[in-house]
Image (spheres, helix red, strand yellow):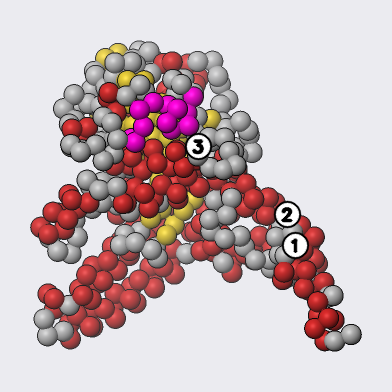
Amino acid sequence: MSPDETTANTPMTWYHLAPDLPFARLYAAAQGQLPSLPAADSEPALNRQFWAELSARQRAELIRMKPVAVGALDGLPAAARHTANVSRLDPEIQRWTGIKAELQVRVDASRVPALDRNRIRLWQAQRKIDDAATVKRIVNEVGGATLLLLDLHSGNRGMAAISFGHTDTAHHIAVTIPGMNTNIADSFWSMSDEARQLKSLAEDLLGRADRHGETVATIMWLGYQPPQVTGPNGALDTVLGGVASTMTSSARAGAPRLARFFAGLDAAAQRPPLHLTALGHSYGSYTMALALQDLAGQEPRRGQPVDDAVFYGSPGINAADEAGLGLVDGHGYVMLGDRDRINLVDNFRLFGPDPTATGLVQLSAAAMTTRDGVERHAARDHADYGRAVGEHLRTSGFNLAAIAAGLGEWAVRR
């Protein structure tokens, strides 16, 4: 028997040739080895199965040795992703601080600093430091914050997703997808306030509906690069950001990531059937629509994990009704403030038909006393929808909370 044949018949070869097979993982565990992690774009349900078959020691070692990959793997338990992602915050701040120092030396040595491309890279490095520091503060200072996603490598700005509430055991999960000019350092503090208020109101409404004990988790998801109107080039970046907001490229790049994230929440759920709601604002609503269509059109068909979707302040959703989004009739909603003209921005309908002219359920954002007896303010302008006035969310926020709680019949129709 040749040496090659001997090697081919040893157990080690099964493991290296087929590391995803259960018996190979068992062999690796017995030998004290770590199996290879699935690819970043693997099916979330398979990722969950992979993780479940590991020993506790293997899981801990993978989190320690490969935190970037573990933290990004959709379908894994929230606690594992959180531990992996949080462990990266200080190293990332240190790494980007070092990069910034090197770039500063190059810019200072440049004969024409204003034209040196390192000036732009220097600006981006500072943004990554600011983004990482903001995430670190939220995780450390806001109770119940779980870091489900952290990407400080790709893109000009950092990307992250933070949940409030236990996503793996919640009965209801609502994911908010923001739009143009959203970034971690400038937006996540206000978004975290809105997410926690949404969770609180949704659980209050569940109590009023005699559905005590049902829990809600809310997530702010910025796993893509929305168009920005700020940058190192001042007014030029404002112009370029405005142009980018009329294009679909950022949304199309982000939609597959969002689709996997939705599928990952569904796969990780320990309390099926999970009620999953997608909340898309502005440019983020178009990104969300593409993600829903991606999920609905997958072959083989696995079913749409998203149960309800709300498009608010939306320029377009690339669909005319729920069927075009893979949703059940009556579970797609549109909301627009009376001074919000975002639906008129897309004159060439690059994003699809005007959402207010579609067959989706049209919701009111007007001032009124809602079903819970609270007098609420109107959401009139583009940034109003999720924001509170005093102690209470607006009518728009009530609608978002009702739908997030699975009480869509309580949302106020227009």
Q: Report the residue at 54% width, 51% height from top.
A: 74
Please provide percent x and percent y for residue 171. Answer: 56, 31
Amino acid type of the residue that numbered disc 3 sits on in the rendered structure: Ala
Q: For residue 296, which numbered disc appears in the image? A: 3
Residue 80, relative to residue 284: is it above or below? below
The quadrant in which residue 233 appears is: bottom left
Spatial separation of the CA atoms under disc 2 and disc 3: 29 Å
Q: Dot 2: what SS? A: loop
Instruction: Give the magenta part as a residue range.
Output: 317-328
Comparing 207 with 14, the one in front is 14
Badge 2 is on which residue?
53
Please provide percent x and percent y for residue 57. Answer: 70, 62
Q: Dot 3: what SS? A: helix
- Residue 387 seen in render: no
Please provide percent x and percent y for residue 286. Answer: 33, 40
Q: For residue 25, which numbered disc appears in the image? A: 1
Instruction: Select label 2 or label 3 by which is in front.
Output: 3
Is 109 on the left or on the right of 296, as rendered? Answer: left
Most common secondary structure along the magenta stretch:
loop
Q: Dot 1: what SS? A: helix
| Residue 158 counted in the magenta span | no
Quick one: quadrant of the C terminus? Answer: top left
Spatial separation of the CA atoms under disc 2 and disc 1: 8 Å
Q: Which of disc 3 and disc 1 is earlier in sequence? A: 1
Q: Report the residue at 57% width, 43% height from top.
A: 299
Amino acid type of the residue that numbered disc 2 sits on in the rendered structure: Glu
